[in-house]
Amino acid sequence: MAKLSVEDLDLQGKRVFLRADLNVPLADGGVADDTRLRAVLPTLEHCLKAGARVILASHLGRPKGKPDPKYSLAPVAKRLEELLGQPVPLAPDCVGEAVETQARSLEPGRLLLLENLRFHPEEEANDGAFAQALARLADCYVNDAFAAAHRAHASIEAITRYLSPPAAGLLMRRELAALGRILERPERPLVAILGGAKVSDKLTLVQSLLDKVDALLVGGGMAFTFLAALGHGVGRSLVEPERIELARRAMAQANRRGVHIGLPVDTVVADSPQSGEGRAVGVREIPGHLMGLDIGPLTLARFTQALSGAKTVVWNGPMGVFERSPFARGTLGLARAVVACGAFSVVGGGDTVAAVNQAGVARKIGYVSTAGGAFIEFLEGRTLPGVAALAERS
Ligand code: ADP
Ligand code: MG
């Protein structure tokens, strides 16, 4: 079931509403990390070369439904201009008469960047009239914002009622293909690695992955809720007591399915994440006054072992507080192990991708997703509104 793609559209002279996810981190009035801008370049360049007039739209941050200069797309326009080597004018708003006039006067092969969609509360409300106002700017619609596809927002969902047929951009297509490879007929063994802070964010993902994977490795803060479920004392480590029972059930579910769940056997403990150093202890010996902030060396060795022979690996969530060097070893070591095992690997999640970059192995990962929330929801097997809204290829 393939989605209609931007390559299937006749774009010559057409005004294309291109919904991208240009929600990049900012610092000192500039773009701190332009990964998401680079990721949309292939679609942008395809449209411009095909003679389209591109109306580019995105949200940025959480401006609470009203204009806020802090969340202007101006820094994005500036960086995109450098990447594209052509002017990227920024409209004063994303809807309204002035913007419509600007969009109408756009020449083929040129683009106009709309101001932050979330300056209007109607965007997140998936408001029909607002979507219609956006649709008035263009003749056709392309969605390249996979990272935002789990949101039923006006520029993602409602707008597809007014601009037809809604097509997938090239990044959207790549994301769907790479992540689809995990869910549909993956080469086995398929190993999933989950980590990060909270188990509550990812318990549904654990449950749905258990139906699909051959082994599941759990590290990071979320591992301690599993260890607590096994009766270990975990000191002051991150634990969600109200999730212990669910963690226990997930382990029973794994048992019934014959899925191996790998949990830490040792952990690097310290006073706090700000601590200058930590020491590795077995998970049966976690001192009551300390917290586990990374997987220990024995665990890293076991996880590395569990990866050997894997044909497909999917990873979301760091193994420890990798932002702090005393607690980064497990995550960075695992990143190298994922690459070394030779499997087709897919990595997603803002922090996990940052860790893979920090380890210097991003280029050897099979596919690095631009998404966090959408990555997780897709792997949970949920229908993403932004994907469901796209037309099927006939
Ligand atoms: P992603 O953004 O890749 O989806 P998450 O946001 O779920 O990942 O988790 C990343 C966060 O988890 C990081 O900020 C990291 O410091 C934190 N973390 C990982 N392990 C632990 C731990 N043992 N204790 C506390 N926080 C942890
Ligand atoms: Mg995160």
Image (cartoon, rainbow, N blue to C red):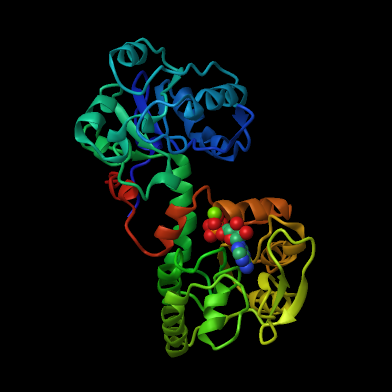
Residue 357 in view: yes
Q: Is residue 331 left or right of residue 155?
A: right
Q: Is residue 156 left or right of residue 215?
A: left
Q: Give how far across and how far down residue 169 sits, in percent.
A: 42, 39
Q: Nearer the viewer, residue 4 or 321?
A: 321
Q: Identify the image quadrant of residue 314.
A: bottom right
Q: Give how far across and how far down residue 181 sits, in percent.
A: 47, 62
Q: Nearer the viewer, residue 256 or 286?
A: 286
Q: Give how far across and how far down residue 249 sits, in percent.
A: 41, 84
Numbered-mark total: 0
Q: Identify the image quadrant of residue 158.
A: top left
Q: Nearer the viewer, residue 133 or 1?
A: 133
| Residue name at image x 48 percent, y 26 percent | 72
Q: Nearer the viewer, residue 93 or 253?
A: 93
| Residue name at image x 66 percent, y 55 percent | 355
Q: Give how far across and how far down residue 23 sits, in percent.
A: 49, 37
For residue 349, above or below residue 262: above
Quadrant for the N terminus in the image? bottom left
Residue 366 in view: no
Q: Identify the image quadrant of residue 104.
A: top left
Q: Quadrant of ligand 2?
A: bottom right
